[in-house]
């Protein structure tokens, strides 16, 4: 990128006292800003449409939960997250070897939590949503494969 090209604006997601889900092939951006106050946000970062390289997620969570659906070998880098009060990053299946995708989380959490779901758990998280049912109906009408459960599964 040269000096005349500006970096693309990050995708902004605001969740205040509500649930916001972005599932399937919903973006091609690698930069996100999540602001949540007593809400719940789900970001699906498994899409092959997201270009290679680091994914940057800037957070501001206040008594909120951010769920990230990621690939099996994605590495979560949360060193620059400022934590205030209870909560933290829950990634029970953190990979032993570095993968080809790195997700860098910055910002702050006040009594918040980040949950990382990988593999089959990520698929189940996506499947138990209204968005999945809507995608199934659209896919059947259009004669294609649904993409919300697994964005990498395209015909």
Image (tube, rainbow, N blue to C red):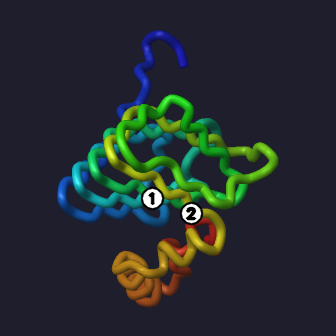
Q: Residue furthest left?
A: 17
Q: Locate residue 51, reporting x and y percent.
A: 59, 43
Quarter occupied by residue 78: top right
- Which quadrant: the N terminus? top right
Mark 1 neighbour density, 10 Å: few (under 14) some (14–19) many (20 or more)? many
Which quadrant: the C terminus? bottom right
Q: CA distance from mark 1 to mark 2?
A: 7 Å
| Position of 18 relative to 51 (above/below) | below
Residues at circles 1 and 2 in contact by the CB criterion of under 8 Å: yes
Rendering coords of residue 2 (x, y %): 52, 13
The kind of secondary structure element at disc 2 is strand
- Residue annotated with mark 2: 117
Q: How many marks?
A: 2
Quarter of the rendering containing residue 152: bottom right
Residue farthest along the right direction in this orientation: 97
Residue at which label 1 appears = 67
């Amino acid at each position: 990128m040269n000096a005349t090209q500006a970096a693309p604006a990050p995708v902004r997601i605001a969740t205040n006292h509500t649930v916001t889900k972005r599932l399937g092939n919903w973006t091609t951006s690698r930069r996100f800003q999540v602001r949540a106050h007593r809400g719940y946000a789900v970001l699906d970062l498994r899409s092959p449409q997201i270009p290679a390289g680091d994914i940057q997620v800037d957070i501001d969570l206040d008594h909120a939960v951010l769920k990230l659906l990621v690939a099996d070998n994605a590495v979560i880098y949360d060193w620059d997250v400022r934590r205030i009060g209870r909560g933290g990053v829950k990634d029970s299946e953190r990979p032993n070897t570095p993968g080809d995708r790195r997700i860098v989380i910055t910002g702050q959490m006040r009594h918040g939590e980040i949950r990382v779901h990988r593999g089959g758990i990520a698929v189940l998280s996506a499947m138990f949503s209204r968005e999945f049912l809507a995608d199934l109906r659209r896919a059947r009408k259009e004669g294609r494969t649904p993409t919300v459960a697994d964005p990498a599964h395209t015909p």
